[in-house]
């Protein structure tokens, strides 16, 4: 065989292997992303439906803006406290059993919010939702590292995390209609909201038990060769992309290192905007459309989410194709900051809505890219706890934001100061993101 013929055969074999590898990754994506997307839709719906419930609940229960914001703060305090032990439990008992159990528990807790009668009972019920939902997002982010090689993670994260803007947009229209059920069977509109949006999570939890597989080796829908090829790519990720070797330092020292603290601070700055979009968008839209009905506010609040879905998909694909993460994280954060500044300075309703669209699109897109990066700074053994630590510390922003925004609104009688607060944090976060210990280009694990 001539040298040129040998090269041709090798090239053909490599091309076949790459095609097979891509086919396996696409097969995993089709199997898992759509299902996890639905689960996340239900999770996020039960987290943010209090924002729409607040359109009528605040008056019915006699809540001030500060009290209403404090209910979400209690949710996130519980969420932060329980996220790390929940991820440890998932790593030990497996995603199938743990995620299924979480969905049943938080679905019941969210449904029970319809029994709130005053600020105190609302605080207790939202705390219970926070306890039960805490492990879902960090758990799924960990689970995806068991199935998707690093080079495919941005698009996988984007397709999974568009559940957040999709749910925000979908629930904006749906929740506005459900509030119209006010008075039927003696229930308030906001009580119907928690009932009809909480029970589906319970049903989906039982489906999880039968659908998810914990690891590729357990997946009967992959043949033996596909399992081996996928596991090889994942093992290569483990060996090449994590800079800290397990024997170099203790687990505690690794988690307390400055690089992990930097990830936490960046995520804290980012999460403030995410929390503001999730909880306050209906009331923000109402603030510059006070004459609109709940239904019209719902449809207007869906517009930023449609813009977000488009940008997340396009930006995630571009990040994977270029194998670049740093600027794909920083630029959307700056877009979000510009959006809040526009919303704060403008007095025209249309420009304010454009600003909210920029803030939502930039922040959610940045989040989907952000969660492709921590494993570049974590050893394999620290991944479960490290992801939960970053999520928990960052979500202190989720706990503080509703309280701060509610207090600022009560103090100034507008959302302008809250917009400025969110913009400043996003600018700080973007500057710090430039310092994250990320590779210039992600190494490919393709055969």
Image (cartoon, rainbow, N blue to C red):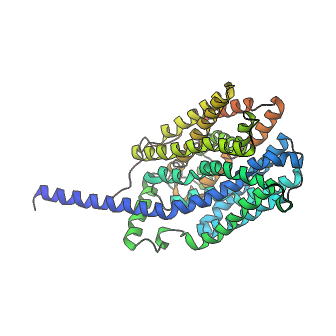
**Looking at the image, which residue is at 66% across and 41% down?**
300
The quadrant holding residue 183 is bottom right
Please, is residue 227 above or below residue 67 in the view? below
Q: Where is residue 339 in the image (x, y as percent from the top left)?
A: 61, 32
Which quadrant, please, contains the C terminus? Answer: bottom left
Q: Which of 4 and 352 is in front in this view?
A: 352
Please, is residue 201 above or below residue 375 in the view? below
Q: Position of residue 175 (x, y in %)?
A: 71, 52
Q: Where is residue 140 in the image (x, y as percent from the top left)?
A: 58, 59
Q: Is residue 307 left or right of residue 188?
A: left
The quadrant holding residue 129 is bottom right
Q: So how many labels did they put on this image?
A: 0
Which quadrant, please, contains the N terminus? Answer: bottom left
Q: Nearer the viewer, residue 96 or 178?
A: 178
Residue most toward the left? Answer: 2
Q: Can residue 435 be seen by looking at this rendering?
A: no
Q: Can residue 301 be seen by looking at this rendering?
A: yes
Please, is residue 413 above or below residue 164 in the view? above
**Looking at the image, which residue is at 87% across and 55% down?**
121
Q: Position of residue 314 (x, y in %)?
A: 47, 44
Q: Which of 305 and 432 is in front in this view?
A: 305
Q: In this view, does 150 lie to the left or right of 35?
A: left
């Amino acid at each position: 065989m001539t040298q040129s013929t040998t090269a041709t055969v090798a090239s053909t074999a490599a091309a076949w292997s790459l095609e097979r590898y891509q086919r396996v990754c696409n097969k995993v994506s089709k199997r898992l992303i759509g299902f996890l997307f639905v689960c996340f839709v239900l999770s996020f719906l039960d987290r943010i439906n209090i924002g729409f419930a607040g359109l009528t609940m605040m008056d019915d229960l006699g809540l001030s803006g500060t009290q209403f914001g404090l209910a979400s703060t209690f949710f996130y305090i519980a969420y932060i406290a329980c996220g790390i032990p929940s991820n440890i439990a998932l790593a030990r008992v497996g995603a199938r059993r743990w995620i299924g159990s979480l969905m049943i528990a938080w679905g019941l807790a969210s449904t029970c919010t319809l029994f709130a009668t005053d600020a105190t009972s609302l605080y207790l019920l939202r705390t219970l939702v926070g306890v039960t939902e805490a492990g879902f997002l960090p758990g799924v982010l960990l689970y995806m590292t068991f199935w998707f090689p690093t080079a495919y993670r941005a698009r996988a994260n984007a397709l999974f995390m568009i559940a957040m803007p999709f749910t925000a947009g979908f629930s904006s229209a749906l929740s506005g209609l459900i509030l119209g059920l006010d008075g039927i069977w003696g229930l308030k509109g906001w009580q119907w909201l928690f009932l009809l949006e909480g029970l589906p999570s319970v049903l989906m939890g039982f489906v999880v038990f039968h659908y998810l597989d914990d690891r590729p080796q357990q997946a009967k829908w992959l043949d033996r060769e596909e399992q081996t090829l996928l596991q090889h790519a994942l093992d290569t990720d483990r060996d090449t992309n994590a800079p800290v070797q397990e024997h170099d330092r203790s687990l505690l020292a690794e988690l307390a290192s400055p690089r992990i603290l930097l990830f936490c601070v960046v995520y804290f700055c980012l999460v403030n905007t995410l929390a503001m979009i999730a909880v306050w968008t209906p009331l923000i839209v109402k603030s510059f459309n006070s004459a609109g009905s709940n239904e019209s506010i719902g449809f207007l609040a869906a517009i930023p989410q449609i813009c977000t879905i488009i940008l997340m998909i396009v930006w995630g694909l571009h990040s994977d194709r270029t194998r670049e993460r740093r600027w794909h994280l920083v630029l959307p954060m700056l877009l979000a900051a510009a959006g809040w500044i526009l919303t704060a300075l403008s007095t025209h309703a249309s420009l304010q809505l454009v600003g909210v669209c920029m803030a939502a699109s930039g922040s959610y897109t940045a989040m989907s890219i952000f969660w492709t990066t921590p494993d570049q700074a974590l050893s394999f053994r620290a991944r479960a706890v490290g992801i939960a630590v970053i999520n928990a510390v960052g979500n202190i922003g989720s706990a503080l934001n509703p309280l701060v925004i509610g207090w600022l609104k009560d103090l100034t009688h507008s959302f302008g100061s809250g917009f400025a607060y969110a913009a400043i944090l996003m600018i700080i976060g973007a500057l710090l993101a430039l310092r994250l210990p990320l590779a210039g280009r992600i190494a490919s694990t393709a055969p």
